[in-house]
Structure formats: structure tokens, C-alpha cells
Image (spheres, rainbow, N blue to C red):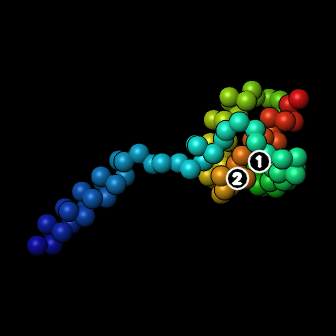
Amino acid sequence: MKKVIAVALFTSVLLASCTPKASKATSAIGPATSTAEQIAQGKTIFENSCGRCHKLPDPTSHNSVQWVGIMNAMAPKAKLTDEQHQWVYDYIVSAKK
């Protein structure tokens, strides 16, 4: 009986680990819709949240498409909400102009 339970538990863990993970951050970035105040908040979040773990990259070092990938990878690590994710992205894109 213990072997049956162990096999069932192992199988369920294996199946759960193989399913694709949905990422909220992936869908967070859209066209720039942030206000000037939200973009300013994005700058603050960028400096404080991103700068906490590593040197801040220059916003001009990547194009907007590359920033989507970078933000999708880093926003979950920084525990950004979808709104904060959008604000930081909009700040980065606006800083390039």
C-alpha cells in the first residue's frame, strides 16, 4: 500500500512539474499607456527593484523588443505586479527618446 501511494505521489509531482507555467508578466507589456506620473513611478521601481540585485542597464542598450524579453524574465524575480511591470517598461522605452 505504501508503494502504491509513493508511486501515485511521485507521478503527480512529475506531471505537475512538466506542465507549462503561465506567466502573468508575459502578458503585462502592451502599448505604452502609462501616464507621466506612472512612468516616473516606473523609474523609481527600476532604480530600486532592479538595482537591488545588479547594476542598472542603460535603457538604450537594448531595443524595445529585447526589453520585452528582459522584462518578462526579470519582473517575476523582482516580484513586480502587472501594473509595475508596464510602468517600468514604459519608463525604459521613454528614456530612450
The residue singled out by tag 1 in the image is 87
Question: How many residues crowd mark 2 within 10 Å: few (<14), some (14–19), many (20+)?
Answer: some
Question: How many residues crowd mark 1 within 10 Å: few (<14), some (14–19), many (20+)?
Answer: many
**Frontmost residue, 45 versus 28:** 28
**Frontmost residue, 13 versus 31:** 31
**Identity, as a three-letter code, of the amino acid under mark 2:** Glu
Pointer 2 and pointer 1: residues touching (CB < 8 Å)? yes
Q: Quadrant of residue 80?
A: bottom right
Residue 78 appears left or right of 4: right
Q: Is residue 32 above or below residue 65?
A: below
Q: Is residue 64 above or below residue 38?
A: above
Q: Residue at x 82, y 51 (%)?
A: 38
Residue 76 image position (x, y, % from top left): 62, 52
Residue 15 appears left or right of 20: left
**Identity, as a three-letter code, of the amino acid under mark 1:** Trp
Q: Is residue 93 visible?
A: yes
